[in-house]
């Protein structure tokens, strides 16, 4: 999820195949190109995560003008470059100016979160996603992008279990909102299943952990059935 790379202007795809395991497809970042790597420490600590299906691409929602997305992307490329050169004062100054200009734009907050993830700063990373959710339009793909980013951090980043737990709750809030808008959004059901199972793997109470894992499994089966039905209908229409 590298900040500063604008999304493409195309639509998501709800269909796709399942491989072995729970859901069986690799998660792609829904906002910006991922630079995430798995550390050995994370491999010891992280809950085992089944990858989620990737949208074909993440389209800019109608309320985000393409020129705004390009401007935000360019700003964050510069901000990240300054930070990587060690000029944090300039990076933070430019970040503040960019936030002041686009603070009502949820794509801005997705980039803010991605920037702080790169800086390994958990609190502002989470706050950025929370602001993205607060400013996101009632558009299922936008809400899916927030939830899938929450899951990607849980699956790949060596933050604490408390951070993972907070991200899971934030992601579930986003994905429940997406599913209220579009109940047959298959990939959203998949991500909800993954987030619930992620919560189950870090839950301290064994009974609650088992309940969460079972709930996630039920949702995964529901997503499989929905996908199978959609593929059947697609073949019939062809």
Image (tube, helix red, strand yellow):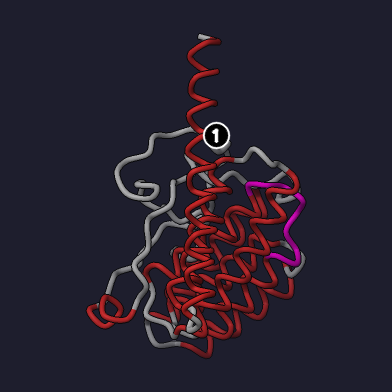
| Location of residue 155 in the rendering, given as x and y in whole percent from the top left corner | 40, 67
Tell me which residue sits at (26%, 75%) in the image.
Answer: 43
Please determine whether, in this image, residue 17 is positioned above or below residue 98: above
- Residue under the point 39% across and 74% down: 157
Is residue 152 part of the magenta span, yes or no? no
Extreme-bottom residue of the structure:
89
Who's the residue at 47% across and 76% down the image?
117
- Give residue 128's position: percent from left, percent from top: 62, 74
Q: Position of residue 165 (x, y in %)?
A: 53, 78
Give neighbour class at mark 1: few <14, some 14-19, many 20+ (Cα, 10 Å): some
Q: Is residue 167 positioned above or below 178 on the image?
A: below
Q: In the displayed structure, does residue 122 sit left or right of residue 71?
A: left
In the image, 95: left or right of 135? left
Where residue 139 appears, x then y in whole percent? 72, 47
For disc 1, the marked residue is 226
Residue reaching furthest to the left: 40
Is 136 contained in the magenta span? Answer: yes
Residue 9 image-quadrant placement = top right
Q: Determine whether 135 is above or below 123 in the image.
A: above
Q: Is residue 89 above or below residue 77?
A: below
Question: Image point 58% across, 72% down: which residue?
Answer: 112
- Write down the region rendered in magenta: 133-141
């Amino acid at each position: 999820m590298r900040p500063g790379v604008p999304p493409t202007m195309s639509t998501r795809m709800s269909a796709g195949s399942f491989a072995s395991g729970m859901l069986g497809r690799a998660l792609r970042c829904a906002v910006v190109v991922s630079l995430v790597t798995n550390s050995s420490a994370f491999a010891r600590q992280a809950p085992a995560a089944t990858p989620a299906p990737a949208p074909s691409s993440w389209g800019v929602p109608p309320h985000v003008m393409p020129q705004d997305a390009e401007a935000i992307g360019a700003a964050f490329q510069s901000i990240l470059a300054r930070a990587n050169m060690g000029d944090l004062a300039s990076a933070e100054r430019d970040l503040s100016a960019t936030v002041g200009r686009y603070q009502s734009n949820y794509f801005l907050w997705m980039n803010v979160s991605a920037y702080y993830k790169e800086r390994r700063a958990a609190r502002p990373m989470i706050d950025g996603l929370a602001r993205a959710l607060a400013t996101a339009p009632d558009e299922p793909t936008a809400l899916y992008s927030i939830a899938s980013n929450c899951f990607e951090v849980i699956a790949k980043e060596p933050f604490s279990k408390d951070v993972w737990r907070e991200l899971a709750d934030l992601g579930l809030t986003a994905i429940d909102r997406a599913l209220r808008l579009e109940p047959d959004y298959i990939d959203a059901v998949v991500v909800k299943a993954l987030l619930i199972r992620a919560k189950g793997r870090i839950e301290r109470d064994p009974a609650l952990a088992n309940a969460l894992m079972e709930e996630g499994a039920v949702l995964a089966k529901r997503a499989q059935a929905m996908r199978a039905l959609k593929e059947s209908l697609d073949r019939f229409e062809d």
